[in-house]
Amino acid sequence: MEQGVQATTGIVIDKLESWWVSLVENLPNIGVAIIVLILSYFLSRLVFKTTLKLIDGRVKQKAVAKLIARVVAVFVVLTGLFLALSVLNLGESISGLLTGAGISGIVIGLALQGTLSNTISGIVLSFRKNVRIGNWVETTGYAGEVIDIALNYLVLKEADNNIVVIPNKTILENPIKNYSLTTRMRVMIDCGVGYESDLEAVEKITKNVIANSFEQIESTENVEFYYTEFGGSSINFLCRFWIDAENSLEQLKAKSKAIMKIKQAFEKENINIPFPIRTLKFNDQTLKVSKAEEALET
């Protein structure tokens, strides 16, 4: 029994002595590895600040800019870690770390596929010049002002002040109409006048009203006017003109103003804008049959 204890104690002591010898022999390498890790840490902080300054003007979303800077900083730290392990002659450890990182990356990627997809889409959106904060856009059935582009979602503020949150992946996969990319918008007005109206006078009055109501319209030649159909109770026409606007709200205001001015001008000239009506005609035979039916019922 005592011999077994002594043998075990000897093995432990020999192992500790070998470890101590290895520690002493590798002290220079350990010192270099620690210096490399410290340098990589401070270098990563410097790289983080530098990257943030470089992309600050190109990426308006602070969250996206910080994410990119952090990724670059983490890459610097990982590079320092692998260099430190190389100094310590831990080749097997490096291979194990790489293998573990690869497997972990696959597992995390599968588990967070939707989140990562939205995050990457947010980074892509932040670099796109055709979608910016403050733009008035329409996509996936919603229209409003872009008030935020986060890592995972885009926030719209609709005309009725409702907030709509749309995943970034949905934005990239669907068409998007950006009204703010152009400084001019076309206003279209559908209206109708009575069949008794002088059509040439209606056209002339409408063009004059539009040209005099908006400063950006130089003359009546810039106003389009077309009669479109013989309606059930009116002859319908389409009036189109361009205004300086960057969102649909300004377009709605211009359309509302044009409708009021056209109605005022038509009332002044006694031009009728009829509402839908139905005219019923009866001949003598129809009236006689109706009277006969009434007599039978009584």
Image (cartoon, rainbow, N blue to C red):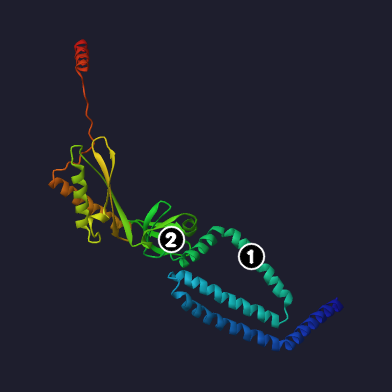
- Badge 2 marks a residue whose secondary structure is strand
- Residue drawn at point x = 68 percent, y = 71 percent: 97
Instruction: Give me the residue at 68% from left, 70% from top.
Output: 98
Q: Secondary structure at mark 1?
A: helix
Task: Say above or below: 231 vs 146.
Answer: above
Which of the numbered marks, if any, corresponds to residue 83? none
Q: How many marks?
A: 2
Percent position of residue 170, x then y:
48, 56
Q: Residues within 10 Å of mark 1 (few under 14, many from 20)?
A: few
Residue 51 seen anywhere in this rendered image of the structure: yes
Position of the C terminus by quadrant = top left
Mark sitting earlier along the chain (1/2): 1
Amino acid at the residue labelled 1: Ser
Inspect this view and state whether residue 160 appears.
no
Q: Please state which amino acid type lies under the numbered disc 2.
A: Leu
User: Please, is residue 10 above or below residue 121 in the view?
Assistant: below
Residue at image mark 2: 154
The numbered disc on residue 104 is 1
* Residue sticking out furthest to the top: 296
Q: Name the residue: 82% across, 78% down.
A: 8
Q: Position of residue 278 (x, y in %)?
A: 23, 31
Q: Nearer the viewer, mark 1 or mark 2?
A: 2
Q: Nearer the viewer, residue 129 or 235?
A: 235
Residue 20 coordinates in the image, percent (x, y)? 75, 86
Q: Position of residue 207 (x, y in %)?
A: 22, 52
User: Counting other residues with Cα less than 10 Å from the Cα at mark 2, is it few (<14), some (14-19), or many (20 or more)?
Assistant: many
